[in-house]
Image (cartoon, rainbow, N blue to C red):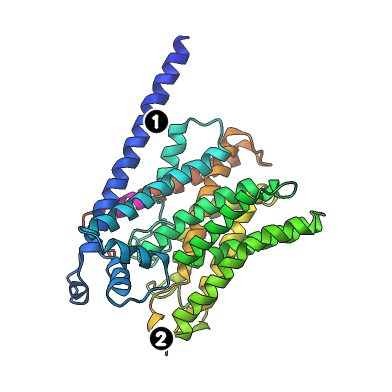
Amino acid sequence: MEQNNKKSKINFIGNLFSLALTICYTFACGYMYFMQASQKIIDIEAGNLLFESDLPYHIKMAVVDDWYYSLTGLLYKFFYLLPASEVFVAGFLALITGATVYLTFRLLKLALTEMPKYIQMLLALALNFMMAAHVDFIHPQLYIGYQSGNLWHNSTYLVMRFLGVLTILLYMQLKDSYRTQLKWKDWLVFTVLLTLSTATKPNFVMVFLPVMAIYLVRDLVRKTPFSRVFLFALSVVPSFALMLIQSFVLFLDTDDSRVVIDPWYALGLRSENAKFAMVLSVAFPIVVLIFSIRNTLKNDVFLGAWIMFLFGWIEVVLFAETGARAAGGNFLWGYAFSIFVVNVTSVILLIKQMKGSIKQPFPRWVKNIYFLIACLLFGYQTYMGVLFFWNVVQGTSYWL
């Protein structure tokens, strides 16, 4: 009885602490987004910018220029009809950022059922900070030149990531059950989420839909009724239609912007050592993969995450934009999301291996070395994210 009371007390304090940290993080993001939204374009062009972000440009394009392809543009137009519009913009983005931490917690909760909730929440918060394993002689900046699933300067990515994680959560519930029963309400919600994420930024579906397509084809081979596969596949039709409209706005309606094949251009935009920076950006999941290839191949979730990463990597390595959008590196956003996903699944796989629920064919000493390296990398990459956030929330340049 006394031991149970002690455990309950620890869980209560842990839950309270993790909740307080998440709330503090959300409010800190709200302050930073408010400062970003308050920046004037004239200050940006004069180089007098402290809180660097794409947010002032996104607001200007939607509110002043009346040009946008993203759902967030419509939201900004609405917010700027209200008094204290920057407060509404910052509050919305802060809620989205905090909610993404909660959704990450939900992903962990699905897989790590026996772990206390406060540890799941702390891991979710850490995963929302994780950045590259910075090595100074490869690239002196802590962020620019690397790739990360976590960033705070692009509002459309923040919203897309939230909707993307929410879509994946629902997909994980439907991917098996749809073979025997697919409720129309679930199908409709899934379709709407896919469409909304595409409306915000098309990059999520560009890395997610190939995974979904591969698994649907596999289900057909495994004798899943064609009618069910076809019905589930119909959920992507609105997203494809929307991407066609977006491509017209972004490319066909302009004189100089095009998509071209230009290997390594996007990754090398701000990095002198793009290939090394690429490895350091996913150092932790790569180590987990090296020691867990068999476990990864046998599990749909782990394998799906790496297939998503592969498609994100192919897109960002091969494709680039020309003209006015050439410097944007816009194929990076899907790749960034896939980095976030493989970080989450790698944490789940590592913890399951450490707890012994997933076996490994290695001697104990090899496993101990692997666990040590993986945990050190996870801790270091989380620390780099916290360090970077601590600086940028105070207005330090992203080029720190």
What residue do we see at 52% from left, 31% from top?
Answer: 115
Q: Which residue is mark 2?
A: 323
Residue 252 position in % (x across, y down): 48, 85
Q: Rounded to the nearest whole Å, what is the CA distance between mark 2 and mark 1?
A: 50 Å
Circle 1 is placed at which residue position?
15
Which quadrant of the view contains residue 326? bottom left
Choose top left, top right, bottom left or bottom right for residue 367. top right
Q: Measured from the top left, where is residue 313 in percent x and y?
A: 54, 67
Quadrant where the C terminus lies?
Answer: bottom left
In this view, 302 is above or below 272: above
Question: Which secondary structure lies at badge 2?
Answer: helix
Image vertical order of residue 93 relative to residue 253, above or below: above
Picture residue at 57% right of the left edge, 72% below the top: 241
Q: Residue 212, image x and y in percent?
A: 65, 59
- The residue depicted at 75 percent of the width and 46 percent of the height is 180
Compare residues 78 and 162 and report the one nearer the observer.
Answer: 78
Q: Residue lying furthest top in this view?
A: 1
List the single residue furthest toward the bottom. 255
Question: Is 119 displayed left or right of 314 in the figure?
Answer: left
The amino acid on which the numbered mark 1 sits, given as a three-letter code, is Asn
Residue 292 can be seen in this image: no
Please name the predominant secondary structure of the magenta segment in the image.
helix
The residue most toward the right is 223
Q: Describe residue 125's horizontal placement relative to residue 181 as left or right.
A: left
For label 1, the crowd category at 10 Å Cα-Cα, with few meaning under 14, some 14 to 19 and many 20 or more, is: some
Q: Residue at x 51, y 71 (%)?
A: 316
**Amino acid type, residue under disc 2 in the picture:** Gly
Q: Position of residue 84 (x, y in %)?
A: 20, 58
The secondary element bearing badge 1 is classed as: helix
Density class for disc 2 (Cα within 10 Å; few <14, some 14-19, many ≥20) is few
Whichever of callouts 2 and 1 sits on the residue coming sooner in the sequence is 1
Instruction: Find the magenta span and give its range.
Output: 385-392
